[in-house]
Amino acid sequence: MIDSHQHFWRYDEAQYPWIPKGSALHRDGLPQDWQAAAGPIGFESSIAVQARQSLEESRWLLELADVHESIIGVVGWVDLRSERVAEQLAKFAQHPKFVGVRHVVQDEPDEQFLVRPEFVRGIAALQEFNLAYDLLIFPKQLPAAIELVRKFPEQRFVLDHIAKPLVKSGIISPWREQIRELAQSPNVWCKVSGLITEADQHAWKPEEFWPYLDIVFESFGVARLMFGSDWPVCLLAGSFEKVHGLVRGYMGSKCGDEQDKVFAENAMRFYVIR
C-alpha cells in the first residue's frame, strides 16, 4: 500500500510555529518513524509532502528520498509567485522523485489567492515539467479553486484533506455543492486524508465522517481518490492505525479492486510514479 500524504521534519520551534507545544508533534518525524507506524499495517511506500515553505526543505526531502526507498515521491515547495519560478522548477524537476508542488494556501488571508495573476503564472509553469499541484485549502477557498482548475484543464490537481470541511460542527453545505462542482473537472483528484483533525480531536466517532466521505466518493469516484494518513499531524487526534481503519472501514462494502485503487494504484497514476 501507498500513503499518498505524509510529512517529515526535524522539529524546530522557529521553523514550525504551527506545531502545538507539548503535543504529539513536538518531536522529530523521520522516515524510520513513519515506517514504524505504517509498516505493520502493510504500507510500503509514501509521498512526502512539504510542511514549510522553503526551498531548503524541498532539497532536504529529496535527500531523504535518495536514502529511503520507501519515499517514492516528494511534493515540495517553490515560490510559484516568483519571476524565477521556471528556474526553480527546472532544478528540482531533474530529480526523478520530485513529483509535485504545494503552497499552504489555507494560511493565505486572501480568499482569491489561487487566482491572483502572479500565482496563476506559476501554476502555468508546472505543465512544462509534468508536475502535479496539491490544493491545500479551507472550504471558503473552494470557489477560487474551482476557477483555477478550469483555467488549466491539462494540469493535474489533487485536493488535500477533502478541503477540510467543518466536521466538528457538522456543517456540510456549501462544501458539499462546491466539492461536486470541483469534481466535475476531470483533471482534479482528491486525497481522503486529514479527516480526524477536523473533528473533535478527543472524542470523534467514525460515523461522523460518513456524510463527507459519501460526497467525495460519489463526486470523484474510486478512480480519482487516494488514501493519505497525514502522519504525523494525524497524531493530534489518533494513530496511523485509526486513520487507516477509518477509511478501510468506510470502504468495507467496496470490492477488493476498488480498495487497491484508493490505497495504492491511484497515487502511482496521479503522481506518475515509475
Image (spheres, rainbow, N blue to C red):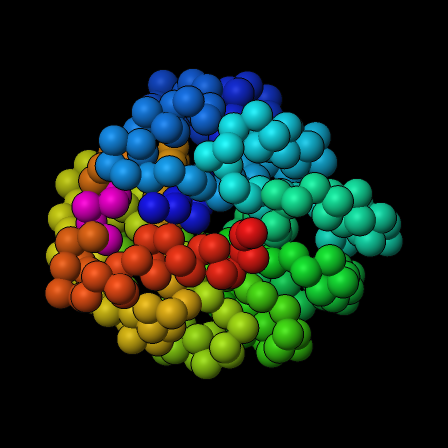
- The answer to which image quadrant residue 121 occupies is bottom right
Question: Considering only vertical position in the picture, is 192 above or below 46?
Answer: below
Q: Residue at x 44, y 41 (%)?
A: 46
Front-most of 127 and 184?
A: 127
- The answer to which image quadrant residue 52 occupies is top right
Dominant secondary structure of the residues highlighted in magenta in the image: helix
Image spot of residue 213 (x, y percent): 26, 64
Image spot of residue 7 (x, y percent): 47, 35
Left or right, residue 137 beside residue 228? right
Q: Which residues are magenta?
A: 243-247
Left or right, residue 97 beside residue 19? right
- The answer to which image quadrant residue 249 occupies is bottom left
Front-most of 229 and 81?
A: 229
Question: Considering only vertical position in the picture, is 127 above or below 80?
Answer: below
Question: Considering only vertical position in the picture, is 212 above or below 233?
Answer: below
Front-most of 5 and 160?
A: 5
Q: Is residue 230 visible?
A: no
Left or right, residue 82 beside residue 186? right
Image spot of residue 252 (x, y percent): 14, 59
Q: Residue at x 24, y 69 (%)?
A: 214
Q: Residue at x 37, y 53 (%)?
A: 264
Front-most of 84 and 198?
A: 84
In magenta stretch: residue 245: yes
In magenta stretch: residue 60: no
Image spot of residue 212 (x, y percent): 26, 64
Left or right, residue 167 beside residue 121? left
Question: Considering only vertical position in the picture, is 46 above or below 136?
Answer: above
